[in-house]
């Protein structure tokens, strides 16, 4: 397995979760080193930190996918490590097989790796069946529209009082 991160704590967390007697976890510290490392070691799984320096995680993941599609790189699973829920939008564009939202824990890292290595996917921060994902932008927009449509009712009284005064 290959981990692309310049943060020691992230490498330590992934290595502790996935490393073992039968599995070695190698590391690169710069995004530009991901594709060459994949060519050299042909990892079954590549775990890429969004915040890796010198190229960025999204660019590194996209480069891996482009090289695979062109036949210049062996197929491998790609998991992104995201900093927050809004980063899901970015991760959806890079072709990753899955992503985790930090902070990490060994259980979730193992679950994601097992899913991707088994040919599946692992996506955190997307609504599942019957789940709602909080969208703060939509909430603010909805509140503003409600206040504009009906300034005297249903909205927050303190906002209406400030508008009236």
Image: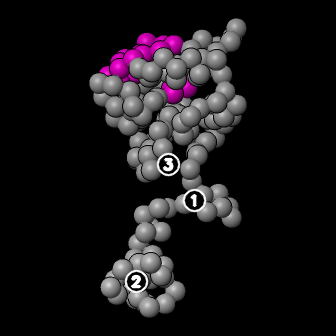
Vertical comparison of 40 with 50: above or below: above
Tell me, yes or no, if residue 91 can be seen here: yes
Task: Answer with left or right where residue 130 lies relative to residue 68.
Answer: right
Say whether disc 3 or disc 2 marks the residue closer to the N-terminus.
3
Secondary element type, mark 3: helix
- Which of the two residues, 110 or 22, is positioned nearer the viewer here? 110
Vertical comparison of 127 with 106: above or below: below
Secondary element type, mark 1: loop
Report the residue at 70% width, 31% height from top. Answer: 107
- Which of the two residues, 138 or 156, is positioned nearer the viewer here? 156
Tell me, yes or no, if residue 114 can be seen here: no
Report the residue at 48% width, 44% height from top. Answer: 84
Quarter of the figure with residue 111: top right
**Over which residues does the magenta segment extend?**
26-47
Counting from the top left corner in percent of width and height, residue 33 is at 35, 18
Q: Which residue is mark 1?
A: 133
Query: Is residue 153 found inside the magenta-colored segment of the image?
Result: no
Vertical comparison of 162 with 140: above or below: below
Give the Cα separation between the discs numbered 3 and 2. Answer: 34 Å
Picture quarter with the N terminus: top right
Counting from the top left corner in percent of width and height, residue 123 is at 58, 45
Secondary element type, mark 2: helix
Q: Residues within 10 Å of mark 3 (few under 14, many from 20)?
A: some
Of badges 2 and 1, the one in the foreground is 2
Picture quarter with the C terminus: bottom left
Task: Answer with left or right where residue 51 lies relative to residue 114.
Answer: left
Q: Look at the numbered discs 1 and 3 and tell me whether their residues touch, using CB distance below 8 Å.
A: yes
Residue 161 is marked as 2
- Which of the two residues, 2 or 144, is positioned nearer the viewer here? 144
Say whether disc 2 or disc 1 marks the residue closer to the N-terminus.
1
Q: Which residue is mark 3?
A: 85
Report the residue at 59% width, 32% height from top. Answer: 104
């Amino acid at each position: 397995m290959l981990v692309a991160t310049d943060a020691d704590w992230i490498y330590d967390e992934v290595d502790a979760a996935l490393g073992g007697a039968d599995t070695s976890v190698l590391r690169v510290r710069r995004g530009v080193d991901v594709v060459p490392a994949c060519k050299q070691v042909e990892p079954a799984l590549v775990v890429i930190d969004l915040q890796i320096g010198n190229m960025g995680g999204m660019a590194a993941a996209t480069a891996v996918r482009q090289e695979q599609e062109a036949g210049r790189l062996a197929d491998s699973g790609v998991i992104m490590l995201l900093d927050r829920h809004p980063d899901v939008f970015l991760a959806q564009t890079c072709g990753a097989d899955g992503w985790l939202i930090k902070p990490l824990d060994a259980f979730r890292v193992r679950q994601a790796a097992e899913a991707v290595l088994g040919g599946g996917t692992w996506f955190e921060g997307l609504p599942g069946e019957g789940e709602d994902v909080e969208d703060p932008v939509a909430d603010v927009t909805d509140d503003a529209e409600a206040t504009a449509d009906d300034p005297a009712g249903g909205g927050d009284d303190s906002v209406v009082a400030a508008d009236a005064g």
